[in-house]
Amino acid sequence: MSSEALVLGIETSCDETGVGVVRGSTLLADAVASSVDEHARFGGVVPEVASRAHLEAMTATVHRALHDAGVTLADCDAIAVTAGPGLVGALLVGTATAQALALAADKPLYGVNHLAAHVAVDRLEHGPLPQPAVALLVSGGHSSLLRVDDVTSCVTPLGATIDDAAGEAFDKVGRLLGLPFPGGPHIDRLAAGGSPDAIEFPRGLTGSRDMERHRFDFSFSGLKTAVARHVELRQREGEPIALSDVAASFQEAVVDVLSRKAVEACRGQGIDHLLLGGGVAANSRLRAVLEERCSTAGIALRVPRPALCTDNGAMVAALGAALVEADISPSAIGLAVDSSLSVDRVTVD
Ligand code: KG4
Ligand code: ZN
C-alpha cells in the first residue's frame, strides 16, 4: 500500500490503557487512561487490578481517540494492538477489543511487539527512523538494548536485564526510602539536591568476567540490596539517612551502567544512532549523561517527548502504520497474546 496509512493502535500490556490514531508519521490522537493510582497502595502493578481497569476504561478511551483524531473506525486502514510482551490478562483486554473492532469494521489486524512499538514511536516525533539504530528501552517492565535494522521486520536483542527492570529498581528503592509509587520521578527530584558521589553503589554486570558473558545485559537487584543494606545499617546505628544523597548515588549507578552499555553497544555494532524509550527515559540524569556520552562518541541521540516514551497507544499505531507501508501481512483475526513474546518477533501470526 502507499504511504500515509491511517491506523488505530491499542496498548494494554501493563497499567496504561492507550489508544492512539496515526496517519503515516503524523500523530492524530493519543488517549491514555492510567490505573497507576490504583496500584500505589500495593507498591507495584497488580495484574488483576490492571486487567479490570483496562476493561472499565477501554470503550471510553477508544471513543476519545477517534473523536480527538476526527476520524471514524470506518476511515482506518488497519488496527494494531500489543500482543506481547506484558501481563497476560491485560494484553487479552486489548487484543479482544482490537479483534472485535477489526471484525466489526472489516479491517486488517496487526498483533505487534510492545518493544518494537517503543522504537517506532519516534517517527511521530523526529520523522523516519535512522536504520540501523541501537535502541535502549527502559521502563518498569523491561530494560533492553536492541539492534534495529528495520523496525517492521528486523529487530535483534543485544542484551536485557537478568533480574529487575530499571524502572522496577527505581520503584523498589523508592519504597525503601519511603517515597510514593512509582518511585522513579520522586527519586529523580530528590536526587537533584544530593551528591551522586556520596555513596559508592555497585555497578551490576560491569566487571571484566561479567562483561564477557553479559556485555550488554543489566542487573539491578544487587544495587537494590546495597541500598537496602545502607539504609538498614544507618537505622540500626540510629544515624540519620541523607535521603537525597542515597537517591542521587543510586540514580548515578543506574544511569552510569545504562549509558555506558548503550554507547558500547553502538560502538560494538558500528552504529551512530541511539534511540531512548520507556518511562525511565524521563529521568533527567539519564538524559543528561546519555547526551554527554553520545556527543563525545559521535552518536546521534533521539529521545521522544516523555508522553510518547511511557506506554501509549500512539506507539502501537505508529508501528502499525509502518507495517502497512512496508506491506507486511496482517495477523490472523484469532491472534493469541504472548506474555513473553521475544523481541525479534515484530508481529504475531
Ligand atoms: O513505560 P512506563 O510508563 O510503564 C512501564 O513500566 O512499562 O514506565 C514506568 C516506569 C516506572 O518504573 C517509573 O518509576 C519510571 O518509569 N519513571 C522514572 C521516571 N519517570 C518514570 N524513573 C526514573 N526517573 C524518572 N523521572
Ligand atoms: Zn513499555
Image (cartoon, helix red, strand yellow):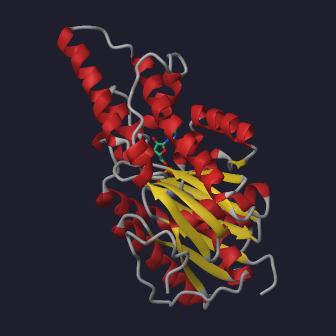
Q: Is residue 313 visible?
A: no
In the rendered structure, the answer to whether residue 146 lies left or right of residue 52 reads right
Instruction: State left or right for residue 336 relative to residue 122.
Output: left
Query: Of 212 and 125, which appears nearest the observer?
Result: 212
* Residue drawn 58% across the image and 31% down it: 285
Task: Give the camera-side residue of 314 and 121.
Answer: 121
The number of numbered badges drawn on the structure is 0
> Image quadrant of residue 201?
top left
The x and y percentages for residue 97 are: 48, 77
The image position of residue 158, as x and y in percent, is 52, 60
Name the residue located 61 percent from the left edge and 91 percent from the top edge.
106
Q: Quadrant of the N terminus?
A: bottom right
- Left or right side of 195 for 221: left
* Image spot of residue 122 (x, y percent): 70, 58
For residue 249, which quarter of the picture?
A: top left
Above or below, 248 against 151 in this view is: above
262, 30: nearer the viewer: 262
Residue drawn at (27%, 28%), measured in percent from left and top? 228
Task: Identify which residue is drawn at 40% across, 19% down.
Answer: 199
Picture coordinates of residue 293 (x, y %)? Answer: 66, 37
Q: Furthest residue to the left?
A: 236
Classify 24 as above or below 31. Answer: below
Q: Is residue 196 visible?
A: yes
